[in-house]
Amino acid sequence: MEIFLDALLSAVLITGLVIIMMMLLEYINVTSAGRMGTTLRRSRLGQVLLGGLLGVLPGCVGGFACVSLYSHGMISFGALIAMLIASSGDEAFVMLAMFPGKALILFAALFAIAVVAGLVVDTLSHDKKAPHTACDAHFEVHGSDGHGVERSWKNLRHPIWQRVVLLAGIAAFIVALALGMLEHEHEPSAGAHFNIFDEYWINLLFAVCSLFVLWFTAVSSNHFVQEHLWGHVVKKHLLRIFLWSFGAILLIELLMHFFDLESLVKGNIPFMILLAVLIGLIPESGPHLVFVTLFAGGMVPFSVLLASSISQDGHASLPLLAETKAGFVKAKAINALVAAIAAYALYFCGL
């Protein structure tokens, strides 16, 4: 039951963050009359840099934002790859707590590798158009939207049922974030203290941002709420993202409960690098803490930590799995390849 509840809470957190991010993107896109997507599509370099920057943000929020941008055709596949490489998931919080100086060096290295890899992927890609995903036909500006979103508190006088449901859901999610009800368990080492980079503060900041979503959901026109927020975001994505996230997390948690993953990392360094890359394919924050702990204790070199950090991306890729299975497999394969190349190169250099 404890494993079931942990998986449920994680799935709710992931789904909530992604849906809030998608609603923000929907609002910005309609308000700007579609100019946001046009601006991002003009520069592949800008997209890759954005993907790398979102990836290095501690936790999975930046990754969720990047997946949302990709699924809406606003950034390239190379930019998505840059995010996945730069992201180290919830382990970023632990590393900042256990070895902050080395963690910042790691994040800088991840960003540099991410940008190079993202640009190479986009250069070699035969498809120069925007990515085709489940959102292509839905992230659009309707003729009835005019030059943006009409806003008025009068819309609350006789609210449509979609507005009521959305307001209740967003408000509940904000409260859950603010009270720390959806936090992950990071299991830091004894004596480690979280600072401003702690997940609670990141989630609290996101709760504040969600207040903006609550506001425009309350005052926007019925058309925007019905067609965009409910039709484009909730109906199209919410259930699918939740089911995939919950199913994947529950399966992984059960495997971790019955198998001792830490015992698998004992051996020579080349094997541990390979193991770190393979375990990094798991779309879950938790198994990778083994490598963080071993590095903090001086038992493995930087190359092993780098392999784990590049290959894994916490929960960030779970929404991608819900959106496009082929894209998920392709992205994770490239992620693992880059991790192996970079880590073995460092190993042979003595790091």
Image (cartoon, rainbow, N blue to C red):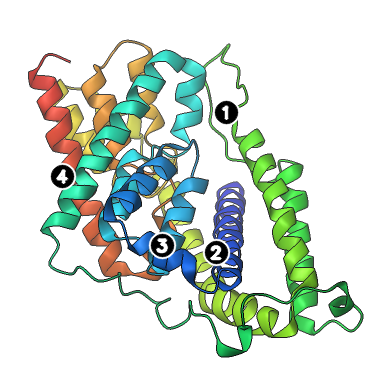
Distance (Cα) linking label 4 and label 1: 30 Å
Q: Marks 4 and 3: which is nearer the front?
A: 3
| Nearer to the camera, 247 or 298 | 298
Three-letter code, disc 3: Thr
Does label 2 or label 4 sit earlier along the sequence?
2
Label 3 – label 1 distance at C-alpha: 31 Å
Q: Amino acid at mark 1?
A: Phe
Q: Residue at label 2?
A: 25
Which of pointers 2 and 4 indicates the residue nearer the eye?
2
Furthest toward the bottom, the residue is: 143
Mark 2 → mark 4, Cα distance in angstroms: 31 Å
Which mark sits nearer the N-terminus, 4 or 1?
Answer: 1
Read off the residue under disc 3: 39
**Residue at 56% of width from left, 59% of height from top?**
21
Residue 91, relative to residue 77: is it above or below? above
Q: Which residue is mark 1?
A: 197
Q: Nearer the viewer, residue 282 or 76?
A: 76
